[in-house]
Image (cartoon, rainbow, N blue to C red):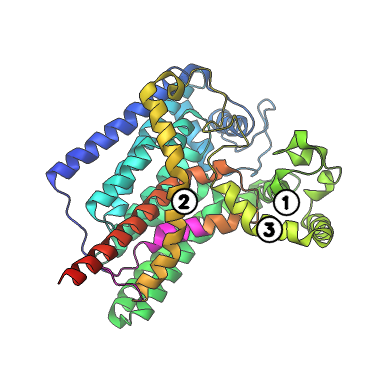
């Protein structure tokens, strides 16, 4: 920090181009048969309603009530704005196919973005491996067909990280920090869970500079990091101000949805009493209307249940929730890799795609193991307790984001769908862990030989 960025050869660029083409082809082939039959329900219907009202009435509301919908702030505005842009360009009758194909392109772009993040702390071969995993990830492919935030959020978040790496990995340039702040701001507007990530990044960078005793660099980077944080904070501030000024007191708000999500995630194993309502335990809980209506009621009811079964609830919050968040099957959806029901699936119609799905499912637990074992490995490497060719703090950002979201969904409902936008970070960390271990044992073998 600053660190030299690895140069990519012409052959490696050709390989990256091939990976991008594979990722794009898989997404186009997946969405093409179903683009006119895209399932709009539950969350997706809310986003479409918001986009419709923005397009027709310039009002941010999910209410379909003629010409005067009441403003609200139940859901983040980023994705409805994205939908409204396509409605403006193509009309509210023909926008959806264009939106889905645009998401296929954004999903394919995750592969080169993963490489441009990975080359800051991985060998180019390792970064290409992470890009390939992103390109063929079945979950990242199937979500492109959904009118949901996952694809857009993943693209904005990974773009923000890529730009920030280029900002902190060389002599500071104000433009890079401004662009990174803008992208993090757009990611926040798409998923408000991003709120504290830029602050954690700034704190981590400053702690790193303090540990490494870079007094001159600390002064240089502090000004740019402060600018980055201030520009980002404009986005939540404006969204909050809009809610304060424009949204009626009794209108649905994001805080209401957060409380409901907390209550939905407070059932160990996503089960209450009736096994038929597993994964929807709130349906047979007579206390649910109170449970999810106020923080006071939620705290009181949850504490009463924890007192009765402390070990069960401790196990659920500490271990069960992270397990479900990062598990393979999308339990609040159609199962396996599908959020929405699909009549014709590329992963069933194509033998090659079926093999890809099988291979990625088989690799999933090993990738998780590598990624999460990379966290203690990073610590011992960074502190100089584990000898490798290079010691760098740069792998910290993807790790920080995965740790942050895991901790966040230990509070809220850990639906596996929420971890899909984080898959590029997961693959990058797994590749870093594997690369670091290979480097260590290779160096050790060479030392013994000498």
Determine which quarter of the picture holds residue 299: bottom right
Q: CA distance from mark 1 to mark 3?
A: 12 Å
Give how far across and how far down residue 374 sits, in percent.
Answer: 41, 61
Give the answer, above or below, for where 229 lies relative to 292.
below
Q: Which residues are magenta?
A: 385-403
Considering depth in this image, is 178 or 305 the residue closer to the camera? 305
Secondary element at image label 1? loop
The dot on residue 315 is 3
Secondary element at image label 2? helix
Q: CA distance from mark 2 to mark 3?
A: 20 Å
The residue at which mark 2 appears reads as 368
The residue at the far left in this view is 10
Considering depth in this image, is 169 or 333 the residue closer to the camera? 333
Residue 3: in sight, yes or no? no
Give the answer, above or below, for where 430 lies relative to 273.
below
Q: Quadrant of the C terminus?
A: bottom left
Pick whichever of labels 1 and 3 is earlier in the sequence.
1
Secondary element at image label 3? helix
Give the answer, above or below, for where 49 lies relative to 9.
above
Pick whichever of labels 2 and 3 is earlier in the sequence.
3
Pick whichever of labels 1 and 2 is earlier in the sequence.
1
The residue at the far right in this view is 286
Considering depth in this image, is 21 or 230 the residue closer to the camera? 21
The residue at which mark 1 appears reads as 266
Residue 198: in sight, yes or no? yes
């Amino acid at each position: 920090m600053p660190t030299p960025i690895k140069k990519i050869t012409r052959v490696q660029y050709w390989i990256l181009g091939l990976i991008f083409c594979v990722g794009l082809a898989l997404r186009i082939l997946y969405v093409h048969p179903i683009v006119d039959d895209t399932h709009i329900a539950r969350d997706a219907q809310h986003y479409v309603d918001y986009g419709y009202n923005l397009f027709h009435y310039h009002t941010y509301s999910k209410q379909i009530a003629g010409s005067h919908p009441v403003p609200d702030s139940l859901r983040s505005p980023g994705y409805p704005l994205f939908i409204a842009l396509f409605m403006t360009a193509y009309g509210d009758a023909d926008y959806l196919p264009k939106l889905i194909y645009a998401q296929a392109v954004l999903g394919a772009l995750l592969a080169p973005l993963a490489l441009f993040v990975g080359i800051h702390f991985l060998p180019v071969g390792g970064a290409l491996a992470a890009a390939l995993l992103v390109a063929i990830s079945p979950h990242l492919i199937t979500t492109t067909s959904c009118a949901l935030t996952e694809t857009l959020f993943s693209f904005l978040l990974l773009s923000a990280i890529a730009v920030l790496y280029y900002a902190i990995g060389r002599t500071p340039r104000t433009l890079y920090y401004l662009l990174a702040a803008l992208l993090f701001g757009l990611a926040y507007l798409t998923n408000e869970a991003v709120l504290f990530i830029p602050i954690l990044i700034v704190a981590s960078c400053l702690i790193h500079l303090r540990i490494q005793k870079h007094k001159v660099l600390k002064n240089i980077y502090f000004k740019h990091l402060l600018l980055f944080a201030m520009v980002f904070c404009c986005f939540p501030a404006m969204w909050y101000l809009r809610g304060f000024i424009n949204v009626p007191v009794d209108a649905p708000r994001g805080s209401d949805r957060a409380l409901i999500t907390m209550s939905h995630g407070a059932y160990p194993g996503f089960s209450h009493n009736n096994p038929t309502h597993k994964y929807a335990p709130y349906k047979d809980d007579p206390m649910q209307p109170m449970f999810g209506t106020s923080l006071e009621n939620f705290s009181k009811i949850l504490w009463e249940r924890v007192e009765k079964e402390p070990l069960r609830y401790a196990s659920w919050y500490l271990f069960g929730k992270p397990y479900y968040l990062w598990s393979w099957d999308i339990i609040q959806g159609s199962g396996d890799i599908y959020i929405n029901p699909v009549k014709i699936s590329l992963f069933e119609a194509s033998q090659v795609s079926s093999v890809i799905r099988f291979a990625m499912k088989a690799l999933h637990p090993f990738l998780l193991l590598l990624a999460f074992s990379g966290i203690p490995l990073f610590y011992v490497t960074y502190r100089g307790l584990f000898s490798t060719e290079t010691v760098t703090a740069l792998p910290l950002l993807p790790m920080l984001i995965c740790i942050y979201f895991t901790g966040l969904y230990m509070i809220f409902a850990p639906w596996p769908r929420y971890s899909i936008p984080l898959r590029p970070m997961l693959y990058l960390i797994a590749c870093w862990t594997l690369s670091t271990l290979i480097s260590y044992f290779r160096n050790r073998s060479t030392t013994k030989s000498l």
